[in-house]
Amino acid sequence: MQFYQDRWNEKNLKELGLNERQIKAVMYMKERGKITNKEYQGLCNASERTTSRDLSHLVSAEIFEQIGMTGKGTEYILRQYKGDKDAKQLIKNLKTTKSNSHDNNIPPKHN
């Protein structure tokens, strides 16, 4: 029998450099399967601007997938990975995202 460690545990998320709000969003999503910006605002008692920035960062870091276009009805789910190769790519993407932003909470702009 093989046991697999949960990739999205709090320790791993902290090592990836996520802030407390973002970790809360991942834990919430693990329980509920999805999250909206409105739910995230209520969960963290944060402004729409802050939660939008956090969610954008989680999507650019390839931790979340965005379902739907921007605006009402947009939901976010945890991105699924297969194997260690994808996990290594996730860490590489997160490091690139961080180095391209002036502030760890602000995702890089995409044209």
Image (cartoon, helix red, strand yellow):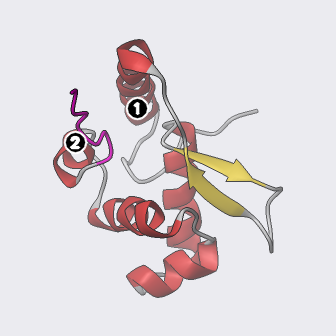
Q: Is residue 109 visible?
A: yes
Q: Which residue is at the front of the view, 53 or 100?
A: 53
Location of residue 71 (image quadrant): bottom right
Residue at image position (43%, 82%) is 43
Q: Quadrant of the N terminus?
A: top left
Residue 81 within the magenta-colored segment of the rendering: no
Left or right: 36 as drawn, with respect to 46: right
Left or right: 62 as drawn, with respect to 28: right
Q: Main secondary structure of the magenta part?
A: loop
Q: CA distance from mark 2 to mark 1?
A: 13 Å
Q: Is residue 47 visible?
A: no
Res. 43 mark: none
Q: Position of residue 27 (x, y in %)?
A: 35, 63
Residue at image position (27%, 39%) is 16
Above or below for 57 versus 72? above
Q: Position of residue 57 (x, y in %)?
A: 51, 48
Q: As drawn, which residue projects farthest toward the top?
A: 85
Q: Residues within 10 Å of mark 2 (few under 14, many from 20)?
A: few
The residue labelled by disc 1 is 94
Location of residue 35 (image quadrant): bottom right
Q: Which residue is at the front of the view, 26 or 69?
A: 26
Q: Which residue is at the front of the view, 51 or 31?
A: 31
Q: Residues within 10 Å of mark 1 (few under 14, many from 20)?
A: many
Q: Give the magenta-colored segment's residue range.
A: 1-8
Res. 12 mark: 2
Q: Secondary structure at mark 2?
A: helix
| Three-letter amino acid code of the residue under disc 2 | Asn
Residue 2 within the magenta-colored segment of the rendering: yes
| Three-letter amino acid code of the residue under disc 1 | Leu
Residue at image position (49%, 29%) is 81
